[in-house]
Image (tube, rainbow, N blue to C red):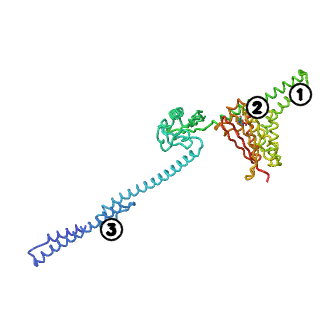
Amino acid sequence: MALGGCAAYYAAMVITYKPDAPDARLGYLIPVMLATLTVMILIGFQRKVHRSADSIGSQLKQLKDSDEVGLIEVSDSEELVSVAKPLNEYLLSIRKNMNRLRSENRELQIQARIASAEKHHTEAIIFSISDAVIVTNRFDELLLANDAAEKLLGFQLASAVRKNIDRIVSDGTLVRLIRETRSHGSSFTRKVVEHNIDSKGVPRTFSITLSCIVAPGEEVSGVVAVLHDVTREKDIARMKTDFVSNVSHELKTPLASIKAYVEMLMDDEVEDEATRGEFYEIISTEADRLHRLIENILNISRIESGVVKVVREPVSLPGVVKQVLDVASPQAKLKDLKLVSHLAPIYSQVEADHDMIYQAVMNLVSNAIKYTPKGGQVTVTVGVDELRGVSFCEVSDDGAGISVEELPHIFDKFYRVKANNKLAKGTGLGLTLVKHIVEAVHDGKLSVASTEGDGSTFTFELPNIK
Ligand code: ADP
């Protein structure tokens, strides 16, 4: 505007200029001055525009380095306002978009954090499960597995992750089950399959639960397989069935012989007094056997339910062992077994329920006799460990022994060592009762050491009377 004004004024001066007018020199001076003025104004204007342009430039440079989108200020140049205005409008729209993106980014970060926390949470749950768990994706590649799965299937998660399941798991059936579940499955798919897997050379039975991973409205994106070891449960179920048949057999055998001898006596088939006496003896022994069996079952359930009546009194452990050996020696003689005893002095005493301790010693001694083949030896030792304040009773034999795998289970209810079944009949309750009597009732300790084919040593200890 200023430039336009100057030009107009200068033009007017040139038009009205007359050289032949009086004071012509002055007349020349005026246009020169006007021109000079105009040039000066132009230079000033140019400088102002330069300054404003520089200011815009440096403001834009600052904006480039800044995280914030500021606006451009052009205070001393009206001409550049027309440039700055649309530029500021543009910057405002950038600022708006940036703010929107920032809040979306924040939202995404929060969601990513939640997702990561949930992932850790899920992993923690999976790692804390004692069952083996493996998770695969839609390409049957391993995504996740817990320690139990690593141990059972013999791989390391770190090196196996993202590898196809058939390269990690050698059990073909398990691989097939996972594949089938993924390819035929839907969000409702959850199948349970029982399958045997070799664990370090030992076959174990697993109940495998396979479920599909499906996000709402999407296809199956993976499979979770949970392998629950049911070997023990199956064994117990089998043992219970065996127990029922064993108990009924155990009950039936003495009952049948009692019935037979009673019938013979009733029918007057026995003439001489000596044979009759012998029959009465057999009936009495068989009745005792029945009584013992029923007592064993009842005692275990009484101790377990806490209703057992314990009569504590000073008891001489060597004395109890002597009583047991007196009763058991005919049984040992029948099998040609040597029954040896090393007993501590009779006066060492423990506070205990006499009948229960008798029962415990009797079960150990009769087991030693039962599971030792003819001609073997059973040794019973009773001693006192003054230092530890305990008395101990050790029953050892050179009989069948028990394998390392079966040893941890022999105190379980109804458990019988298969290999030894042919040596003697039983119910698998005797040792359960001994453990209950020694540990639950008397706060003692029962232990066993055994070598298959070489014999066993059962030891229990009870606190001495102080
Ligand atoms: P059972 O009525 O079968 O004898 P127990 O509970 O007394 O039941 O014993 C459990 C199993 O432990 C037995 O079936 C037997 O196989 C094994 N066992 C117990 N004592 C001995 C032993 N002294 N030697 C070898 N095996 C034994």
* Residue tagged 1: 277
Q: Amino acid at mark 3?
A: Ser
Q: Position of residue 281 (x, y in %)?
A: 86, 29
Residue at the spot 82% in from the left edge and 40% down from the top edge: 323
Picture quadrant of residue 226: top right
Q: Any mark on residue 75, and which?
A: 3
Q: Position of residue 28 (x, y in %)?
A: 12, 75
Q: Is mark 1 within 8 Å of ligand 1?
A: no
Q: How far apart are labels 1 and 3 at the CA level?
A: 135 Å
In primary-sequence order, the first of circles 2 and 1 is 1
Considering the numbered disc 3 on the image, is that residue within a helix, a strand or a loop? loop
How many neighbours does mark 2 have within 10 angstroms: few (below 14), some (14-19), or many (20 or more)? some
Where does residue 53 sit, x and y in percent of width and height?
A: 28, 64
Q: Which residue is mark 2?
A: 336
Q: Are marks 3 and 2 in contact (CB under 8 Å)?
A: no
Q: Does residue 341 appear to the left or right of 211 in the view shown?
A: right
